[in-house]
Amino acid sequence: MAEQSTATITPDHKLVVRNIGLMLSGDIGNPILEADTLIAIGGRIAAVGRAKDLDTDKADTVIDANGTVLLPGMIDSHVHPVAGDWTPRQNQLGWIDSTMHGGVTTMISAGEVHTPGRPRDVVGVKAMAIYAQRCFDAFRPGGVKIHAGAPVIEPGMVEQDFKDLADAGVRLLGEVGLGGVKDGATAKQMVAWARKYGIQSTIHTGGPSIPGSGLIGADVVLEADTDVVGHINGGHTALPDAEIRCICEGCKRGLELVHNGNERAALYTLRVAREMGELNRVILGTDGPAGSGVQPLGIARMVSLLSSLGEVPAEIAFCFATGNTARMRNLDCGLIEVGRSADFVFMDKAQHSAGKSFLDSIQLGDLPGIGMVVIDGLVRSGRSRNTPPAEKVPSVQGH
């Protein structure tokens, strides 16, 4: 049932999704929608509501959700791609397509740092970023949208370099601290230049993860003032609780929790964010591929972890992986909202889960069963090859 990564949709293609059992919006302010039908035209959401109130005639494709749960495609805010769907970090092929089977439809690069022979000179840094941006803009394994081309800042870069990058289409910085710039003052200046030209930034937080990286503590994180505090729960080694709290209280930036981090520190960060009434700042990533390997179900596992052990309602925890990230990263996906990209995932309670309902199963710590993934209004996969089997799955018909 999977579509090719090069598949495109016509501007007038009409997709109707009916018989939705539960619709999760991705919006932390209104996580559950009173709706059972969704219409997408040309790969964008055109209407959401009750079937009796919507024009469902003349559809090119109809998906019968069969009472399953529909939610926005999940977003991995922290990945390290290199070359297509291969990672030299674990010498593994197909990791992006496999992650799509875990419900992820968008990935954000935190730097192509595992590229063998990664250049450290300014010309090389810029060239590699533009190359990666172009490649992943044109190649989408499994249909996944990969926002790549994230240069790691190095000493000697000047304002013009950031303007050049922006003019070439680069919109991200890799993790500050993975290159030669590790002090707060230099990082602050370069982050400000990047922001001036519309380039979003993130910073390595915690102990070193790969040779060449180092400890980045709360003082540097706060001075650098990046848009996202990358893996605040460590990648892998976390800062002391007092420094994590200092970061949470000392800035209003994104608080990124990753699968390849310290789980206790993730739960502590979540607790602090909740105390502050700022769960909207929490976003999720895997920080893979890494020494821990590739985690196709990493985002789903983080949702279940934070819901079950962090005592967060499941519908809110899913917002960490969807709408929170979309808004922080200025993406046109991640929310079930008219005008957004028609990227969504169909889930249901895993077979034999002890949960009384889908949401209850997540709050008990179980993984969801994924029955279908749609990206840009096109079916990209049927029943996931990676999740436990869902109790119910959607069916599709069309021409």
Image (spheres, helix red, strand yellow):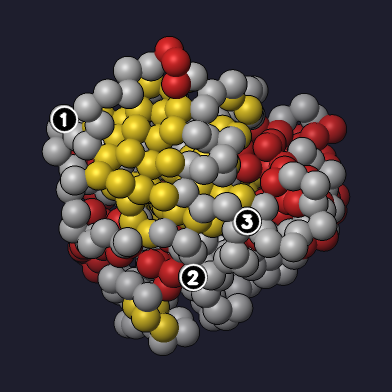
Which is more foreground, mark 1 or mark 3? 3
The percent position of residue 6, horizontal first and vertical second, equals 18, 58
Distance between the alpha carbons at the discs numbered 1 and 2: 31 Å
Please tell me in which quadrant of the rendered image residue 237 appears.
bottom right
Amino acid under disc 3: Glu
The residue lying at 30 percent from left, 46 percent from top is 397
Q: Secondary structure at mark 2?
A: loop
Distance between the alpha carbons at the discs numbered 1 and 3: 33 Å
The percent position of residue 190, horizontal first and vertical second, equals 42, 46
In terms of depth relative to the viewer, which is nearer, 183 or 144? 144
The residue identified by callout 3 is: 391
The residue identified by callout 1 is: 12
Numbered tag placed on residue 385 in the rendering: 2
The percent position of residue 186, horizontal first and vertical second, equals 49, 50
Distance between the alpha carbons at the discs numbered 2 and 3: 14 Å
Residue 91 falls left or right of residue 231: left
Would residue 131 be seen by someone viewing this image from the given angle?
yes
Mark 1 and mark 3 lie on one chain; the one further toward the N terminus is 1
Mark 2 and mark 3 lie on one chain; the one further toward the N terminus is 2
